[in-house]
Image (cartoon, helix red, strand yellow):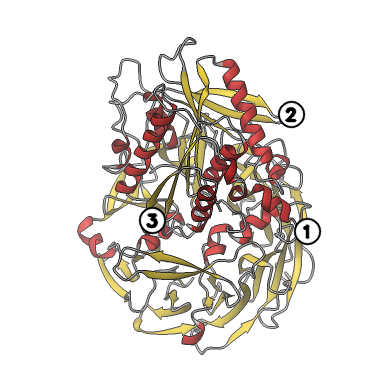
Amino acid sequence: MLSALCLSACGAAAHAQSAPEKKITVEDLFAHGPLTGQEPDQLQWSPDGKHLTYLDSGALVEIDQATGKAHILVDRSKMGPLQETGGTERDRDERNRYHMASYLWAPDERSLLFDSSGRLWDYDLKSGTGVQVADSGQASGDDPKFSPDGKSISFLHNRGIFVVRLQDPIHGVMVGALPDQAQQFFNNGGVDWVYEEELSTRSNYFWSPDSQHIAYLQTDERNVPQYPITDWIPVHAGVVMQHYPQPGDPNPEVHIGVTSARGGGRTDWIQVPLHQGDDYIPRFGWVDRKTLWIETLTRDQKHRTLFFADMTDGLAHPVLEISDKKFLDEDYDLQIADGFIALTAWSSGHNQIYLYSYDVQHPRKQKAKLVRQLTSGDFDVRTIYRLDVKNKLIDYASNEGNPLEQQIWQVDFSGASKQLSAGAGFHEGDFAPQGTAFTDRYSTRMSPPRLSLCSGPGRCNVFWQTHGLDAYHFHAPEQLQVKARDGSTLYATLLLPEGATAKASVPLIMNPYGGPGPQTVADRWNMSLVFDELLAQHGFAVLHADNRGTGNRGRAFAQAAYHDFGPVQLQDQLTVLDTALAQYPQLDAKRLGWWGWSWGGSFTLYAMTHSDRFRAGVAVAPVTDWRDYDSIYTERYLGLPAQDAESYRQDSVVNSAANLKGRLLIAHGTGDDNVHLENTIQFIQQLIDAHIPYDLQLFPRKTHSIAGANARIQLYNRIVAHFEEYLMPQAPAAR
């Protein structure tokens, strides 16, 4: 998924007017780690819900549930060998981007499994000693798991699954093994790039509840085209070939297999109805020790089906189906337990929770029955945290009451709901597997995150909060509401430089994301606001707006992007811009800029090639031809190229490059495995052919996030310098 980029996780707070003011610099943001201290990393609940732990400064910390006080569970001296880091730039970026856990609680809470870049350690909490159960020669570092009985550990190895028994870790066995010649194209239990990125798949193998079997997804990429990611740093350049299906290309072919956890090589394949391998299996798991649940999604992403399958005969039976005329909401998560299924869908016009039931004794015999739609209204449920069948409760997050906020809620099976979080702003929950405890990560637009441990509504203890920002002064942006042409409300914020009176002449920079999914205008902390403050201190105003096609505003608002990746989005942004110019006479309509990252970078190029109003722009890692991006994401909105070639042609900025107005800076990482460098190369070739000058900043080996202090400092300083050169009073005239 193309995503809006936030800066590193740090924060700032609103300060009293009497606080001493210090100008913020790019170096402040990146040179010395997070501006406000490191937020607790990898919060994990123990299976019994009695322990909450996280990583902090090289130690493992536990929070006392009664007081919210922290104490060291495993100190730095013992954590040292358990936390070695390594791997390539791409490996580190992947682990960070997809939040891969570096430690796991054992089912009996007596030990922890640490993943140290491929070496796995079983750490006994009572004795304080760690035993290495797999070294980097065995493990790939991917997706380690305890068996439900806690007697074995599994992990991915050579694109198959390896299992070791903790009583005899030396003699492990391969299950779902692949012959050497098949490993280039097949993957048993691993997650390929496009599933990980676009379907948010985080694991493709699961233990049966009785620890006797493992179900896994096999991915066959023999027909998937490959893209070369080149490393030019060595004397002899290296190339990594990435399987990457583009719109219309063959997708990975997928199958569900079940094999014995004791090895032996035999796999029983489940017969899942798919359309010639083009459909997706975004989620699957175990209903009980004999029954699998399997969710499928058609390639056009208009039909979602849930199957129950008996592992003994391999037959899958449909029990639940959801369809949409355009495309489904991209949250494919399911909660299944003890006769109930909970999921979200936007069939009513907004993403709401639906509760279904099934026969626990004979789950395949009949369709699941709709118990009721548990939530309803003009709001979106964003995620289901927990299905608690015993107490007939569901914990979830939604923007009920205010589309710019998120609160934590609970609803019972009768449909009665109550709010668990308190305080206007944005709350993100993490619930214990058992009991009533949860964490609340809370922030507002001007107040950075703080973390609390809660035992119920109003019973919370803060255990971490931002500190160290007394030297800085941040001021709040103006909140705007504008009507789109179809009557929809568009939300925006405008940050003006301090002291910019109506008689001033202030250049304005627009910074939308604009694409499907992310909502950038919300009452939550976002580090991009700190960069906005930096720009304001340099004399710029900054405008953010969420146009139609972005997320969390209901089905119709999101589906404005259906076969429309440019016109409706630009129309809305210009509507907001004209409103801001009319309301704030200090804004200079002749000195306008635009910048964005990923979809926002594509949007920058679209705006500068479809309007002559923008004097300067910066596009970071942009898609320039939608035929260059991946199949799952692009086809969800634009369909297959053969079916709507005109939308692909009109919405791809490579075809309008000759119309570019204003001075452009493009930045891209050469190791970007998400938006490939070919996008930028193809676009600048069109600029060369049209005799249009441009500025280019490449970052060797860097992936889509262009991570790292040195790279970020150079990138953001270049952005500031670019706008100062072309938007300030002494700037040369735009082309």
**Where does residue 268 sit, x and y in percent of width and height?**
62, 84
Which residue does the image show at 52% across and 88% down from the upper left?
Answer: 265
- Tell me what residue is drawn at x 31 percent, y 47 percent: 709
Tell which tag, 3 or 1, sits nearer the viewer: 3
Q: Which residue is mark 3?
A: 702
Q: Position of residue 249 (x, y in %)?
A: 64, 67
Is disc 3 in contact with disc 1, using a CB cutoff of under 8 Å?
no
Q: Secondary structure at mark 3?
A: loop
Identify which amino acid the numbered label 2 is placed on: Gly
Pointer 1 local density, CA inside 10 Å: few below 14, some 14–19, many at least 20: some
Q: Which residue is mark 1?
A: 369
Q: Which mark is residue 487?
A: 2
- Any part of residue 397 in sight: no
Q: Circle 2 sits in a helix, a strand or a loop, which is it?
A: loop
Depicted 698 relative to depicted 596: above or below: below
- Amino acid type at mark 3: Lys
Which residue is at 64% across, 38% downward?
Answer: 569
The kind of secondary structure element at disc 1 is: strand
Q: Is residue 401 visible?
A: yes
Occupied quadrant, residue 546: top right
Tell me if 590 is positioned left or right of 32 in this view.
right
For disc 2, the neighbor class at 10 Å (few under 14, some 14 to 19, many from 20) is: few
Front residue of 460/478: it is 478
Q: Residue furthest top?
A: 503
Q: Which mark is residue 361?
A: none
